[in-house]
Structure formats: C-alpha cells, structure tokens
Image (spheres, rainbow, N blue to C red):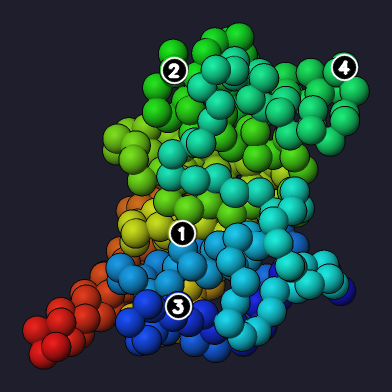
C-alpha cells in the first residue's frame, strides 16, 4: 500500500488544572503519492497539531498515521519539514546546510556535492552556494530550507506556514517555486497556511478545518495548482472560479471566527 493515510486522528491535551483541550477529533484523510494538499482554517483549529502528528513530533491520543504501508511512530527522514522560519544552521554555508542530511546518512562527498548543486540550481541559488546564511534574504533562506528538505529525499514534504513571513512579491515567487518543485519531484506535499489565496494557488486538494475540536469541514478539488505550473500566478488569480471559491471560503472562515468570538464572549 502506497500513499499517506490519516486514520481517525484525535488529539487531546490534558492541562495541569485537570481540564483538557480537544485539539482534533476523528480526522480521516487519504493522500496518494504526489498529491499537493493545502490546509486552511481559523486560528486554533488544529492545523499545525495535525501536521506535527504526521511528522511524528506528536503521538495522537487516538488513531494512527500510515505511510506507504507502515505506521508512523516518530520523526523520520521519509517525512521532511519546512518551517515558517528556515531553522537553518547559521554557522554553515548554503551548500553545507543542503548537504547536512546526506552527510548524516553517510552519503559519499561527491554524491552529496552533486545533489546539493542540482537542488541549488533548481531553487535559483547556484550563485550563492558558498554564502553564509545570514547574508541571505528571508526568501532566499526559505529556498535553502526547501533544498535542504529535498536533499533528504523524503516521501512527504510538510510545510508549516513556510511563506508567511515573506513580503508579497517574494511570497508570490516562492509560491511559483513550490509548484515547480512539486511537479519536478513528484513529492507529496501538505502545506498549512492562513492565506486563502495561497491555499487556492497551492492546493490541488484543499481542506477547510472547523474550529476546535479540529475536524475536516469541507474539501475542495481544484485546478489552480496545475494551472500555476505553466502560467503566471497573477493570471491564475483572475480565473472566475478562483474568485468564486475564494469568496466562498472567506465567508466560511469568517463565520467560524465569529462563532469562536461568540464562545469567548459567552465564557
């Protein structure tokens, strides 16, 4: 069996005062190899918690994660994570950061260098491979983070708000890069974002999650990621269906946020 299965995942956090927070409840989802999934929802709906469970950073209270026929029980190189901030090694060069994973696996030097050079080429960093991380802009650092993740040859790439801290122009360029890498590598990608527009652009499938306890509220199958591989993203955004779905989802999340605010005021 290939692909990723999220089976009846629930997550409960027990608090010191004896109460608890039910972050997720009965989340079930199947992803085929090579699918690109974006996940949206109001603050506190469990998006990042779900991603951390898939990564193996958290053990769910109930349910299980199955990847390519085996159960996920902890972190593993088969699942790569790209964080909102690159979490790069500041004291290493760009090349050394990308080579780090293969180095830890004992990959020969020549092979590591070849892999790093290829990934830095396709991420537009070939001219910066010997630069220190602190010499790079935020967008370039996120490109290094993507290249470093890919160097480990994961089956699944998990992205937690990876473009959230970037300016609008850099963010759009990075969105195009994510689509390019998705198409060229055939990797399964799960991307968490707070931006409805970004979720539409980067989600071949898109999940809208309901407020706590986090559940799948609605799923969309969309053409925009495929369109964005070969077209300018600004043209994709002008598609009539893009605007229609964006407004539908914005209204949906706005209603959820109002529901959350109502709960807070009643408490």
Gap between marks 4 and 1 measured at Cα: 35 Å
Q: Are circles 4 and 1 on residues that touch, CB within 8 Å?
A: no
| Residue under numbered circle 1 | 192
Per the model, the C-alpha gap separating discs 1 and 2 is 26 Å
User: Which class describes the residues within 10 Å of circle 3: few (<14), some (14-19), or many (20+)?
Assistant: few
Indicate which disc, 2 or 3, sits on the residue closer to the N terminus: 3
Specify few, some or many for label 4: CA neighbours under 10 Å numbering under 14, 14-19, or 20 or more.
few
The local crowd at label 2, few if under 14, some if 14 to 19, many if 20 or more residues have their Cα within 10 Å, is: some
Lower sequence index among marks 1 and 3: 3
How far is the residue under mark 2 from the one under mark 3? 37 Å
Secondary element at tag 1:
strand
Circle on res. 210: none
Q: Residue at left 55%, top 88%?
A: 26
Q: Residue 214: in sight, yes or no?
A: no
Q: SS at mark 3?
A: strand
Question: Which one is in front, 48 or 240?
Answer: 48
Quadrant of the drawing holding the N terminus: bottom right
Give the labeled residue for mark 4: 110
Q: Are marks 2 and 4 in contact (CB under 8 Å)?
A: no
In 3D space, how far apart are the residues under numbered discs 2 and 4 (Cα atoms)?
26 Å
């Amino acid at each position: 069996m290939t692909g990723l299965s999220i089976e009846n995942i629930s997550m409960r956090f027990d608090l010191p005062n004896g109460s608890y927070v039910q972050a997720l409840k009965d989340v079930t989802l199947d992803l085929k190899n090579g699918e690109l999934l974006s996940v949206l929802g109001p603050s506190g709906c469990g998006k990042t918690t779900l991603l951390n469970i898939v990564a193996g950073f958290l053990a769910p209270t109930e349910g299980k994660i199955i990847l390519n026929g085996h159960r996920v029980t902890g972190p593993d190189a088969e699942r790569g994570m790209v964080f909102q901030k690159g979490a790069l090694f500041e004291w290493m060069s760009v090349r050394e950061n990308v080579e780090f994973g293969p180095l830890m696996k004992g990959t020969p030097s020549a092979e590591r260098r070849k892999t790093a050079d290829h990934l830095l080429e396709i991420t537009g960093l070939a001219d910066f491979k010997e630069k220190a991380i602190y010499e790079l802009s935020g967008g370039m650092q996120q490109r290094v983070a993507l290249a470093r993740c890919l160097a480990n040859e994961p089956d699944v790439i998990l992205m937690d708000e990876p473009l959230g801290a970037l300016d609008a122009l850099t963010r759009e360029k990075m969105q195009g890069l994510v689509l390019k890498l998705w198409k060229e590598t055939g990797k399964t990608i799960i991307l968490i974002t707070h931006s409805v527009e970004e979720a539409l652009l980067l989600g071949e499938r898109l999940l809208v999650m309901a407020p706590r306890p986090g559940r799948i509220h609605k799923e969309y199958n969309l053409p925009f990621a495929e369109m964005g591989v070969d077209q300018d993203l600004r043209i994709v955004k002008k598609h009539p269906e893009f605007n229609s779905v964006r407004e539908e989802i914005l209204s949906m999340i706005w209603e959820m946020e109002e529901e959350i605010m109502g709960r807070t005021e009643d408490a």
